[in-house]
Amino acid sequence: MTRSAEQLVGEFETAWRNRDGAAMRALWHPDGKLYTPIVDRAVSPHELPRLVSLQVRMSPDLEWSLLGWAVAGDVVYVEWQTSQSIYGRSIEWRGMDRFVLNGKGQILEERVFADTAPFRIVANEALRDSAIAAARNGVSPDIFIRL
């Protein structure tokens, strides 16, 4: 099956709305890599269900919204906004994902561009009081997710 850029964006949006890591993984070529500022290393597609699960565990109220998208050849850009609670404080932030697709419309590479300052500010405040609790939740003191 060959997936168009429009289909990819629709499926990506649905996967986020449903918080469905398996649906997210299905968008990928098995050898792809995700680079995101909230994980301390490159992520393989088979790890996406766990990553989504950890994100939802950290922020059960996570809401992801598609703001727009564009395509240029085999590259798709997706602009988004999230709102969520981190350590009991509500934050909103925006970002952009850049996908490189193969000829079948599978993701080979995703790079997430976002300002992580809202996370870091909240994390630093919370971790002053509770570094041990954060570590138990799979979060390092600098708000990276450890897979």
Image: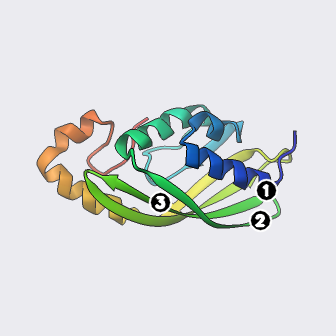
Inspect the image, locate mark 2, and give the three-letter code of the amino acid beneath it: Val
Which residue was labeled with disc 1? 5
- Label 2: how many Cα within 10 Å (few below 14, some 14–19, many 20+): few
Extreme residue toward the left, this view: 129
Q: Secondary structure at mark 3?
A: strand
Which SS class for mark 1?
A: helix
Q: Which residue is mark 3?
A: 82
Q: Residue 84's spot in the image, x, y percent?
A: 39, 55
Residue that appears at 57% across and 49% down: 17
Which of disc 1 and disc 3 is earlier in sequence?
Answer: 1
On screen, residue 3 versus residue 13, left or right, reads right
Q: Which mark is residue 71?
A: 2
Report whether 76 appears left or right of 123: right
Which mark is nearer the camera, 3 or 1? 3
Q: Secondary structure at mark 2?
A: strand
- Identify the residue at horizontal 26%, vertical 59% (top origin): 122
